[in-house]
Amino acid sequence: MPASHLPLAVVPMTVRAALPAGALAVALAISAAAVADSNPQETTLEAATALSARAAGSDLELVRGDVVELADLARRHIREAGLDAALKDFLSAPWKREANGLHLWGVTTRGVSWFDTGHPELIGIDVSNITDIEGRFWTQLAEASARGSGEKVFLLLFPHPKTARSAVGYHTCFMLDDERILCAGAFEDAPTG
């Protein structure tokens, strides 16, 4: 793999530290897209398995990159397998990652949770009036991300799916054909003890 296509995780911290914040965000997005598409012989399942094997810990730059990569892989898997088959696949490994609570979730444009591997207790509930810990309406952020009218990758302060403790998380979303939104999300790993 050419050096220009290496995942950001293998770029030395000294190089990452030298990049301005905006340039780093762009580099993360480009890096995730390049990794997802750089090896045409790597299957979507192989790429998802490789992503599942990584952990970002409390490095929010890596969390953000992993979220973008998972969304790209999910979109690719839906194209390859069809929506129904892909949704069934998303319920298990390698599409769910213990580390960082990396997972897929979805809401409708009306704000009803229809899919969530991180917080399955929310499925079927109108979550349009639920905010994160800092008062952000996350369904509105999800729709703005999916439609391109807001931040493509947005930050929430929300309970970590495994620890239930408040954790910073990144999310990015895309529209499906039927006014449903599918998102990828992950959190900084929070101490469990």
Image: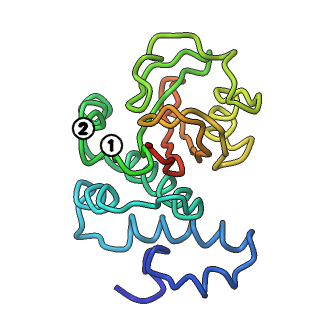
Q: Residue furthest front?
A: 193
User: Would you identify the image quadrant in which residue 155 lies?
Assistant: top right
Q: Is residue 48 above or below residue 62?
A: above
Pick the quarter of the image with the N terminus: bottom left
Q: Residue extending furthest top?
A: 125
Which mark, residue 92? 2
Q: Is residue 146 left or right of residue 101?
A: right
Rendering quarter of residue 87: top left
Looking at the image, is 88 positioned above or below residue 129? Answer: below
Q: Quadrant of residue 52?
A: bottom left
Position of residue 115 in the picture relative to residue 40 (left or right):
right
Query: Residue sitting at 49 percent across and 74 percent down?
Result: 8
Q: Are marks 1 and 2 in contact (CB under 8 Å)?
A: yes
In the rendered structure, the answer to whether residue 142 lies left or right of residue 50 reads right
Determine whether the residue tagged by mark 1 lies in a helix, strand or loop: loop
What's the residue at 70%, 80% (across, down)? 19
Residue picked out by circle 1: 96
Q: Residues within 10 Å of mark 2 (few under 14, many from 20)?
A: few
Q: Nearer the viewer, residue 157 or 163?
A: 163
Label 1 is placed on what type of residue? Answer: Lys
| Gap between marks 1 and 2 measured at Cα | 6 Å
Q: Where's the C terminus, which quadrant?
A: top left
Disc tally is: 2
The spot of residue 70 in percent (x, y) is 42, 51
